[in-house]
Image (spheres, rainbow, N blue to C red):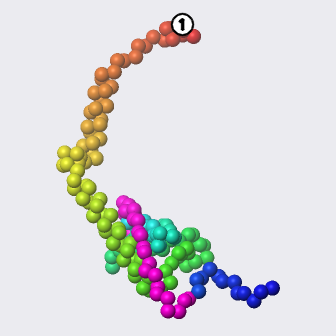
Amino acid sequence: MSDEKTTTGQAPEQEGAPALPMKLDVSVRPIEPKGNLVGFASLKINDSFVIDDFKILQGDKGLFVGMPSKPDRKSKTGYRDTARPITKEFRAELTGAVTTAYRDAVEKLQARAAAVPVAEKQSIQKQLASGEKQAAKDSAARPTPEKGGKTKNAER
């Protein structure tokens, strides 16, 4: 047997080694708000590790980021976080990156909506009415089927 210690997956601390800068790539998906939920985000760390299912929530104090979680009957809230930041500094960095990406995505959507010509922007009621008129025209243009039960029975 050897006297080597097994590690628990943590990298050994190297004294004097400079900390590598952390690269956070955030992708967001804004949704139609459901309660205070306004979107979802994924986080890629140093092009090596991805965490999905962050929730972007609108609260009284602005946007905040909900951690990925799963149902847990034993917890007070009914859910248990499956990923969470350990330090306050990283939580602040994560929240800043996600909220910035969310605001950028919303601005792009608003710019695309503003670029659509006004003639194409119809209310739902107008769209339904024009669709109903078009369907009536199509139905009137179709020839009516002949009602002749004898011909069908004769073919059988």
| Element marked by disc 1 | helix
Q: Is residue 35 magenta?
A: yes
Residue under the image location 70 percent in, 87 percent down: 5
- Rate crowding at label 1 as few (under 14), some (14 to 19) or many (20 or more) other CA atoms within 10 Å: few
Horizontal and vertical percent position of residue 134: 28, 32
* Residue at the extreme right of the image, as rendered: 1
Tell me: 86 left or right of 62. Answer: right
Residue under the image location 23 percent in, 48 percent down: 121
- The magenta region covers 13-36
Q: Quadrant of the N terminus?
A: bottom right
Q: Is residue 18 above or below residue 154?
A: below
Residue under the image location 30 percent in, 29 percent down: 136
Horizontal and vertical percent position of residue 104: 31, 67
Nearer-the-camera pick, 11 or 125: 11
The quarter holding residue 74 reads bottom right
Residue 60 visible to the viewer: no
| Amino acid, disc 1 | Ala
Count of marks overlaid on the render:
1
Horizontal and vertical percent position of residue 92: 40, 82
Q: Is residue 136 magenta?
A: no
Residue under the image location 36 percent in, 77 percent down: 96
Tell me: 109 left or right of 93. Answer: left
Residue at image mark 1: 154
Residue 94 visible to the viewer: yes
Q: Is residue 37 above or below residue 11?
A: above
